[in-house]
Image (cartoon, rainbow, N blue to C red):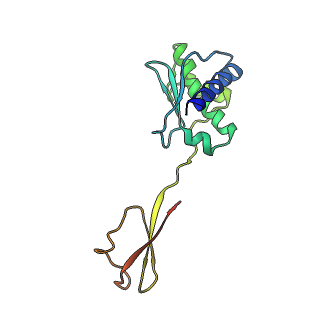
Amino acid sequence: MEVLDLELQTLVEQVSLEDFGLAFEHQAVWNNRLRTTGGLFYPMDCHLAFNPLMYQRLTSIQFRQIIRHELCHYHLFRQKKGYQHRDRDFKNLLAKVDGLRYSPKVMSKKYRIYQCQKCGQEFKRVRQIDTKRFRCGRCSGKLIYQTTRYM
């Protein structure tokens, strides 16, 4: 992951210079705990954290737009202007540099498929079912676990 951190750092510095005309002087890192967010700006120490899943699953143009979004927070905070999502300065700068307002959905929901042995009815459930305790709602047949899929 160390090589990717260096790669991310140079990419963020490059986007900052090309799209904002300002230098990025802090650290950009990956954060594996992020699920629905593309990135985070930390005002305490001005570092940026990005979701590695977004980098893997989105196009380079979309990920560049996520970087622009976080750099809007960064540069406005450094200039002591409104850097939060609700601020007019943030909305204007984001539109100017063509950054994404919201992160695209990349996470898929995991569900389990159970099937009745008697009638063949399939049941899709997010939570695991105790097949010894629960039965089919149509015919009271025994349920068996089939597979796990992603939506």
Residues 34 and 62: in front is 34
Quadrant of the image occupied by residue 74: top right
Identified at 56% across, 30% down, the residue is 2
Residues 89 and 48: in front is 48
Identified at 61% across, 43% down, the residue is 56
Residues 148 and 44: in front is 148
Residue 54: percent from the left, percent from the top? 58, 41
Identified at 71% across, 22% down, the residue is 18
Identified at 56% across, 47% down, the residue is 105
Residue situated furthest left in the rendering: 133
Direction from residue 107 to residue 119 in the image, left or right: left
Q: Is residue 11 above or below residue 33?
A: above
Q: Is residue 140 above or below residue 59?
A: below
Direction from residue 1 to residue 43 in the image, left or right: left
The answer to whether any part of residue 103 appears in the image is no
Q: Is residue 73 above or below residue 119?
A: above
Residue 60: percent from the left, percent from the top? 68, 38
Residue 82: percent from the left, percent from the top? 51, 20
Quadrant of the image occupied by residue 66: top right
Direction from residue 114 to residue 134 in the image, left or right: left
